[in-house]
Structures are given as C-alpha cells and as structure tokens.
Amino acid sequence: MSAPESRVQNLSHQQKMDAKADSGREDNSVSNKISSVGAFEPDFVIPLENVTIAQGRDATFTCVVNNLGGHRVSGDGASVPAKVAWIKADAKAILAIHEHVITNNDRLSVTHNDYNTWTLNIRGVKMEDAGKYMCQVNTDPMKMQTATLEVVIPPDIINEETSGDMMVPEGGSAKLVCRARGHPKPKITWRREDGREIIARNGVHQKTKAILVEGEMLTLSKVTRSEMGAYMCIASNGVPPTVSKRMKLQVHFHPLVQVPNQLVGAPVLTDVTLICNVEASPKAINYWQRENGEMIIAGDRYALTEKENNMYAIEMILHIRRLQSTDFGGYKCISKNSIGDTEGTIRLYEMERPGKKAQREEDLNEVTKNEVVLKENRHEDGSRNQNGRLYKDRSQDADLGSGAAQARQLIMPFLLALFVLLASKVSCCLANGNAPASTGLGNDSMRVAESTATTRTMAEANGGGGVAGGSCKARFIL
C-alpha cells in the first residue's frame, strides 16, 4: 500500500494516537473518544447513484453530506473538521480527499459547492474506470456510500472476422459469418435487405422461413436464384448506435429466356413491340436477330431497350416502327453469359388493316344483296340472268330426263310388239306378191284388221288354198 493511501485510510486512527500521546495515556480510555461539538453528526442526504455510461463519455458521482462542518475530532482540546474522501473500492485506492486529488489520473477532478455537495468527475471514461466508487466521511466509525460505474461500449463489427460479398453456383451452399465487439456482448441478427424471408434448410425436406435469424453464422444450403441479393448483419447490445454490414450474395446460373407471346400479328405501316424475359447471372449479353442470322441494330425503325426487374431478371424489348412487308418473319432474342447461352423465338405475321377489313366486309355484304336480286330475275323456263349471262338450272333438265326415262319404260313393250306385227305382215305380203300398205302408228289396229280381211279374200279367190295358195293370216293380241 502506498504512503498516501495509508495516510488517508489511517487518518482517524492517527488523530486518536496523537490525542493519546498528548494525554500521556496509551490505553483505549474514554478520554480518547471522539466528541461532537455540533448538535448533529454528519449525515448523507441522498444515496450515491449507480452510473452507466458509454465509453468515451463523461461520468459524475455526487455525494451530499449535511452537518459536516460542525463535526470535530477532539484530542488535546484542538478541533479537527471531518473530511470527505473518494475511494475506488474494488481497487482499494484513494482518489481524492475533500477537493484535493491524490491519484495521478488527470481525467479525475473533485468539485465542492462550499456547502454540502462533493462531486467526483471522470472525463472520457474508459473500460478500466468501471467498478465500485465510495464516498467516505472520516468519522468514528466511518460513514460511507458506494455506487457502481458501468462502462458500456457500442457494438462494432470486426471486419477481419466477417464475411464479404460471396458468389455460389445455383444449388450450392453459402456460409455468411458476422462477428462484433462491444460491452455487453453484441447480439447478431440477420435479415434480407429487400425484406423477403430467409430460407433455412435442414435436411432434404425440412425448410424453414423467417424474416430474422439470430447467430453469428448464417448457413444457406441448396441455394436458388430467388435467394440472391443483399443480406444485412446487424449487431446490437442496447448501447446506441446499432451497427450493420451489408453482404451481397451472387448466385450464378445458365441464362433462361421466356417468351410471353411467340406469335405476334400487326398490319403494315403500324408499330409493334416484341418482348422476351431473360434471367441470367452473372449479367448476360442480350441481343436480337432475324431468323436468317441478321443482327438487329438500333436505328430509326428499331428501338432496343432493357428493363431490369431484379438483380438477375430483365425484360428485352424490341420496338419496330412503320412495319414493312420485309419485317414479317421470325425474330430471335439471344442471351449469353460466362456459363452458357440460350434463345427465344417470336414469329411476326401480317394482319389486315382494320379499315381495309371493314371495307372488304362491306363489299361482301353488297355482293350478297345483289345475289338476292339476281335470284328473283328468273324466266319461265327456269333460266335466269346473272352478271349479263343466261343460266338454266340443271335441276329442270334432270327432272325432264327422269320423266322421259319413265315414258320409255312404259312404251317400249308396245313398240316391240308393233315391230313384230309389222315384220310379220311384211313377210306375208312379200310371200303373196303384194306390197304392204303404208302403216302409221295412229291406226295400227285397224290396218291389222284390214290386212287380215284382204288376205282372207285373196285366199278364197284362189280356191281356198292354204299357204300354197298364197293365203296369209296374222293374229295378234294387243
């Protein structure tokens, strides 16, 4: 123990020893007692309060003592006033007596309001300043108050022990580490910068989602492109300010092209827009081609734009102005990155202009109306005039043909019988040397009868001979 510390701590004892020496007595007699000249003994007015302060800030302890000026320590009749001392209790070190600082710490000072208040000031508090402090009055017995100084340190992320930006292939794993110092020990919390859920996978089928995840290490397994983005490591211990660090997770994968409309139609001399949605990481080179391999360059009639939807998805847009007939055909949107390439195809076809289509429908309606009128202009024989030409329905000819066929079927047997009759008559007449009379279809039955009678008369004239006499008979049943 240092000499100043021993001197202060034994202050009351030394006063008593001096009083004993002056009286010539070395025992602890009643004459060595400490008497109070004043009416009251020293008394602490308010408790000494604990202090919690951030490192680097200023801390103060205030000790209020009443009746200190009237208290005396008696010895040989001399009076000694009581004093207030500041002590670092856990280190057993005297810091100051009354207003005099004993320790060689230039950050400490004591102020007194010349009445009953003593204040211990500590500038720029450090961690070694933390502990118990005592305000002590050197009465017998001593009176004291104690309080605790707690020094807190805001969190600070240890960069050399913390992960930075990271790249993993899709389907791989990523481990993000974040460590911080501070007092009390900081708590580490993870969250995504965009506010989306963090996906934690345990095993093959177990998957949990959370907005906040606690712990120094964040493990992501079987990473997908949707988990790509910025992750925030947040360190806090109740001492402001809370600190954080941003870590960017890149997930690399082969480009993917999706075409919302693979078939697009537009009329000539109008504008049209072709769209392809592309996902790629790392960032891809995107361009348009015709199906014959001709690359499309931005110009007066072609506008090429890209709209970013997120850090790995974009929208490729091709805008064609004043369509020409040569613009119709196939188009390719192509995406290439360091991992691979892919393409999508769109076919652009020509559509009829709305005005032209309406005119064509109007003309068609007019033709239909004219056709109705022409159908009404028919002749008695069933023919009709259309566009300056004479038409006759085939259905009428077909009906006539059908009737003629039926008539032929009815008259053919009669004609056949008549033919046989005429043939017999002719042959008979020729055999008798007579020319056959002319016949007509209108009087066939009569002529047959006449022929029969004539033949019979001739036969009788010849003596009633038979065939040899030239007689000829023909009988028919019609």
Image: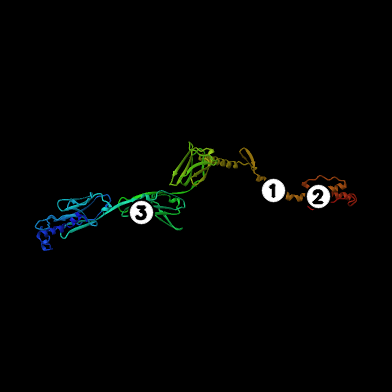
Residue 348 visible, this angle: no
Percent x, y of residue 325: 54, 38
Distance from label 2 to label 1 (Cα)?
Answer: 28 Å
Can you name the residue that lies furthest to the top here? 300
Q: Quadrant of residue 222?
A: bottom left
* Mark 3 vs mark 1: in front: 3
- Is 153 situated left or right of 397 in this image? left
Closer to the chain start, of discs 3 and 1, is 3
Say if 238 sits above or below 348 in the image: below
Q: Which image quadrant: the N terminus?
A: bottom left
Percent x, y of residue 121: 22, 51
* Mark 2 vs mark 1: in front: 1
Q: Return the residue at label 3.
A: 188
Q: Residues within 10 Å of mark 1 (few under 14, many from 20)?
A: few
CB within 8 Å, label 3 to label 1? no
* Mark 2 vs mark 3: in front: 3
Q: Return the residue at label 1.
A: 403
Distance from label 2 to label 3 (Cα)?
Answer: 132 Å
Percent x, y of residue 378: 62, 42
Closer to the chain start, of discs 2 and 1, is 1
**Depth check: 460 or 400 in front?**
400
**Depth check: 93 or 265 in front?**
93
Q: Which mark is residue 421?
A: 2
* Residue type marked 3: Ile
The kind of secondary structure element at disc 1 is helix
Q: Residue at x 76, y 50 (%)?
A: 414
Closer to the chain start, of discs 2 and 3, is 3
